[in-house]
Structure formats: C-alpha cells, structure tokens
C-alpha cells in the first residue's frame, strides 16, 4: 500500500493533511480519490491507515482509520558516518542504507576527502539528501525517516563515539579486529532500555590516514575490515550495515 | 599495487603480455616503465607479481617475479541470479557484488521483467557487463573475475538449483523461512572437496509471481526474506550476498 511521510504538525488528532509533492503524487500519479486509503507516518512515532476525505493535488486530507504499531524497524540503531565521497555517491549511500535500515547519516570531512566543501550549496544538498532518504524510507516501508545532518569536521565526528554503544571504523590494518566477534559481543550484551546504537565510520575514496585511524582508536572506535576484498567507499557502508543487522537477528534469529 | 586480469593465453610460462585498454592504462594513465611491478592474474587459477621488461601503450610485456597464492576469495561460491532490472541497475548489481565477492552472475527473464530483450544488442551488453566485472575485480583485489552469461529463461534458471548446494529465492510470504538458520545449517554442513555453491535468485522490480515462487520451491529453492524492510531489486542481491559471506565467516569467524 502507498505510504507517505508527513511532518508531525500535519498529523494532528484524527486528521492528516498531505501537501506539496506528496499530494501531487497521490492525486496526479496514483490517481487517488475520496475513499481511497494509504498509510501515513510522521517518520518518528506515529503511523496510521488513513482514508481520503478530500483529494486536491495541493492538499490531500484524510482521516485515521486505524493506528498501526511501528514494527518495521531493526532492533539496533545504526548510524552511518560517511566521509564525503565524490560525485553522487553520498546519495547512493543514503538511498541504499535507508532501504536496508540505517537511522542516521553523518557526513563528515576527513584528510583525504576530495570533494570541495561549498557552504553556499550546503542547504540545497542537505535538502536533496533528506528527500532521497524520505523517498527511500517510503519505498522500503520503513516507519522512520533517517536523520541527516550537515557535514561535520573530523573532530566533531569523533566525539559521536561517546553517544554510541559501539563505534566501528572501517580501516585495513595488519592485525584485523574480528568484526563478527565484536558484533556478537555487543549485541548479546546487557539489555538496554532503548535500542543500542552502533556507529560505523567509513573513509573517503583514499581511506583514512594512519594518524586518523590512531585518533579514532583513542576516541573509542574499533577498527574492522569487511572481508578480504577491497570495497569502494560507497559499498562499505551497505556491507557494514547489513552485517550489523544480520548479527542482530534482523534476517532471522 | 596495480592489478590487471589477462586471458590465460596471455600468461604463459614466466612471461605475461598485457594488451588493449589495460596496456594503455598501465603506460598512459599509471605511467609505468620498464622495471615497474604490478600484479597479474588470469582470473581463474594463476596470479603473480610481475616486472615490466618492455612498456608500450599497445602491449606491456612483463616477467614473473613471484607466484602468488590466491587467498582473497571467499570460501563459498555465491551465484547471483538476477531477473533483468530496468536501466543500468544490472551494471550496478555486477559492480557491487563483484566487489563484495560473488563468483557468477546469471541474468534471467521472469514474468514481471520489464526490460525488452533485444538479441541484437545482446552481445554488446554482455561485453559491457564483463568489462564492469573485470574492472571491479581488479579494484577489489579479487583473484577471480566473476563469470557472466547471456540471459536465461525462467525455466533454464530454475534448473541451476540442481548444480548448487543451496538455492535461495528472495520472495516475501506470510511464513518467512528463517534465512539465518538456513545459512547456518548449510555452512556448518559436511565438508566438501570444493567450495560450496549458494545460488540466490532475485526478482525484477515487481517481484516474482506466486506461480513462479511455487515453481521455484518445487525446483528446490528455499524462499527467504531479507529483513523487515522492502528492498529495491538492485539492493537485494548485495544484501543477500553479504549475509551469506558473513555467515560463512568472511567478516571474521
């Protein structure tokens, strides 16, 4: 069934108003009419089956038929910290990792980041990233739209390890830490009141420098490698995310 | 270190001759000269560190310095059977799954395949797919270049289950088979003389029909789902492949 995410204020009491591109999509593309139903979510804590009471391409108003439990989310909150890659690879990471189940994207700048940071274009880019995440979440039947912030500096990114229950950094070294053992220990650990947070940091095309790797370890990141092959930067996030969700029982316990 | 795959006949005795685009790449892009070294592989059963004895942009001749053991390959042979997706998504599946470690791609046509099959363009397309696999294998430091065949019919694809030790089909049903349990049982099973083969069949954008799902089960495929979210067709192959390699101990045992 069709699914739209709306801002919390559009979803008050027993009524929801879908506006903008989503209203256009519902009426013009999906040809929805009064009486048709869809699923509406505020992307955070409320989701319902709703029925259209008025269909206009600028605003679709619907009433709640049934509140739905939000059970499509993984039991682990995975945060993807991605050093800005070239061209449209960040969009790719956001789309694919939203489908698979990440809850937060943290773009950051590291020593070997090639992309020029352009503060003027920043707003537009962030808006585009958020649109991609929203659409991927709708398509994947997620309950939540992942959070995406503006790019952080390397030092700002490192501090996030303190907020996470496990922080991993993808970096190849001679003695590889055993990713699976680290994950198994993390996930079988003590029960928490909230979903445990796993943060994964991925380098840019040229990887992290040895100095960055050392600083990350000091900040609490565990270096891991993802198999014996060498993954492109935009592939690493998807693989790491899949491994975490697999170990957490997301693909069957 | 730079890596080139060559055909077996280019790699005879203690000498290897790199030709075509790779020779151009080595001499013009990488600016390699006599005395420079690179890794050369026939993509199947031989890999060596070689040293250039003559560098010409049409043919680079090098001599073997040291034979290398081929240890970068996963312990499970994963075959990706992908119902032809739209636009350039097959290229994407080939590139990403080659990086991660698939050894064979089996494009096929199923009921909901949208792409028009064009026999005239077939040769060119296959050539392009193979080039993508070769380049991804070089970049990922693989020992092997995955095999890619021309698209099969649905019936032809089903028969492949007989050649595999485990055949999975990604299909959502009410009672989902537990992918992790299936994988764990498969991989902990009896030791085989060769790497076990896991075949994964992925549907097109619209998925498989119920009739196809039933036929696949009869042919020996086990239906599995990949988590609670709904993945795009081009994402499913990567996720399934990563799960299989993770369970096989590829990310640390």
Image: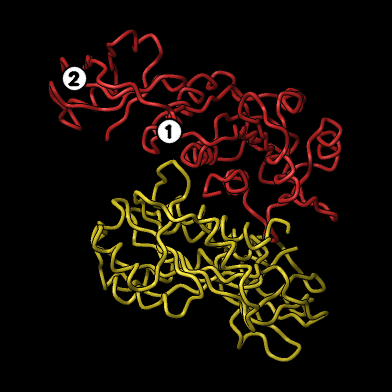
Chain colours: A red, B yellow
Seen in the image, is B242 located left or right of residue B16? left
Percent x, y for residue B228?
45, 42
Question: Taking A173 as reference, is A102 above or below it?
Answer: above
Could you tell me residue B234's position as x and y percent?
42, 52
Q: Residues within 10 Å of mark 2 (few under 14, many from 20)?
A: many
What secondary structure is marked by label 2?
Answer: strand
Q: Which residue is mark 1?
A: A142
Which of marks 1 and 2 precedes in the sequence?
Answer: 2
Chain letter behind tag 2: A
Relative side of B70 to B65, left or right: left
| Residue A169 picture quarter | top right
Q: Quadrant of residue B196?
A: bottom right
**Residues at marks 2 and 1 on the same chain:** yes
Q: Which residue is mark 2?
A: A52
> On residue A158, which mark appears?
none
Of residues A40 and A137, the one drawn nearer to the viewer in this rendering: A40
At 79% from the left and 74% from the top, the residue drawn is: B34
Q: Badge 1 sits on which subunit?
A: A
Residue B136: x, y in percent?
57, 61
Q: Nearer the viewer, residue A224 or A142?
A: A142
Q: Residue at x 49, y 54 (%)?
A: B178
Q: Residue furthest bottom?
A: B13
Above/below status of B94 relative to B16: above
- Spatial CA distance of label 2 from label 1 is 22 Å
Q: Residue at x 86, y 38 (%)?
A: A214
Give the crowd class for mark 1: few <14, some 14-19, many >=20 residues within 10 Å.
Answer: many
């Amino acid at each position: 069934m069709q699914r739209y995410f709306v801002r919390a204020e559009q979803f008050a009491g027993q009524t929801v108003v879908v506006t903008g591109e989503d209203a256009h999509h519902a009426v013009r593309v999906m040809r929805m009419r009064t009486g048709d139903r869809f699923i509406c979510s505020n992307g955070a804590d409320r989701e319902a089956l709703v029925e259209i009471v008025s269909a206009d391409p600028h605003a679709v108003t619907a009433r709640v038929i049934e509140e739905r439990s939000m059970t499509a989310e993984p039991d682990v909150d995975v945060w993807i910290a991605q050093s800005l890659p070239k061209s449209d690879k960040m969009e790719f990471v956001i789309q694919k990792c939203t489908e698979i189940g990440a809850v937060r994207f943290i773009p950051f700048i590291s020593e070997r980041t090639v992309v020029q940071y352009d503060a003027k274009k920043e707003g537009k880019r962030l808006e585009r990233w958020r649109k991609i995440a929203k659409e991927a979440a709708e398509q994947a039947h997620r309950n939540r739209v992942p959070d995406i912030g503006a790019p952080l500096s390397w030092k700002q990114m490192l501090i996030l390890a303190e907020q996470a229950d496990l922080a991993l950094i993808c970096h190849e070294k001679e003695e590889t830490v055993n990713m699976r053992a680290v994950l198994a220990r993390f996930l079988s650990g003590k029960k928490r009141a909230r979903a445990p947070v796993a943060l994964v940091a991925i380098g840019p095309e040229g990887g992290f420098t040895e100095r960055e790797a050392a600083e990350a370890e000091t900040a609490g990141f565990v270096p891991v490698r993802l198999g014996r092959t060498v993954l492109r930067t935009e592939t690493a996030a998807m693989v790491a995310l899949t491994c975490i969700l697999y170990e957490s029982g997301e693909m069957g316990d």
